[in-house]
Image (cartoon, helix red, strand yellow):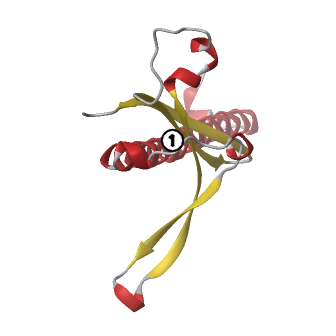
């Protein structure tokens, strides 16, 4: 066999190389898209959890007597979260893309505690904060619950 006569690459070599490079680039692009989508989804979820924590902390800072039980007709109502940027008259209200629902129920009125005479009314309230947001085309919700006790 004379190696001096074998010059260059054949059409088959070139075709196989292009197919392998195309598959490799498509695989890398798919991995990058998935990583980016997961990163954005995790960021939105973390932001929703942060809003829920802030709402619970604000409720804990209030006077216990000011925490009114949520009327049953408002339990399914979400309201948009609006933030203010700036001070005074120049403050601008901006929607965040998140909605919140706060439910406050006296601990003695919870369904699992009905009929239990050992639980006193008006001493402990269960607070649930739900944050809803849109992630791609799906509405996701994050919920946090806590109990707040009356201080004497």
Q: Which residue is mark 1?
A: 45
Circle 1 SS class: helix
Residue visible at 42% across and 83% down in the picture = 91
User: Where residue 8 sits: x, y (%)?
Assistant: 61, 41
Indicate the quadrant containing the N terminus: top left, top right, bottom left or bottom right: top right
Quarter of image, res 19: top right
Residue visible at 59% across and 22% down in the picture = 110
Query: Farthest left residue?
Result: 152
User: Where residue 132 sits: x, y (%)?
Assistant: 62, 46
Examine the rendering and report whether any part of residue 8 can be seen: no
Q: Nearer the viewer, residue 19 or 143?
A: 143
Indicate the quadrant containing the C terminus: top left, top right, bottom left or bottom right: top left
Q: Nearer the viewer, residue 151 or 38?
A: 151
Q: Is residue 88 above or below residue 132?
A: below
Examine the rendering and report whether any part of residue 24 can be seen: yes
User: Where residue 34 sits: x, y (%)?
Assistant: 58, 38
């Amino acid at each position: 066999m004379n190696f001096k006569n074998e010059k260059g690459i054949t059409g088959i070599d070139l075709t196989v190389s292009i197919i392998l490079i195309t598959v490799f680039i498509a695989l890398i692009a798919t991995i990058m898209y998935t990583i980016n989508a997961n990163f954005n989804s995790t960021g939105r979820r973390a932001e929703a959890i942060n809003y829920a924590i802030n709402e619970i902390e604000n409720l804990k800072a209030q006077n216990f007597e000011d925490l009114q039980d949520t009327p049953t007709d408002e339990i399914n109502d979400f309201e948009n979260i609006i933030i203010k940027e700036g001070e005074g008259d120049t403050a601008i209200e901006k929607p965040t893309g998140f909605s919140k629902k706060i439910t406050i129920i006296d601990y003695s009125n919870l369904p699992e505690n009905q009929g239990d005479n050992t639980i006193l009314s008006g001493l402990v309230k269960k607070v649930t904060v739900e944050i809803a947001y849109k992630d791609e085309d799906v509405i996701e919700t994050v919920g946090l619950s806590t109990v707040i006790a009356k201080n004497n």
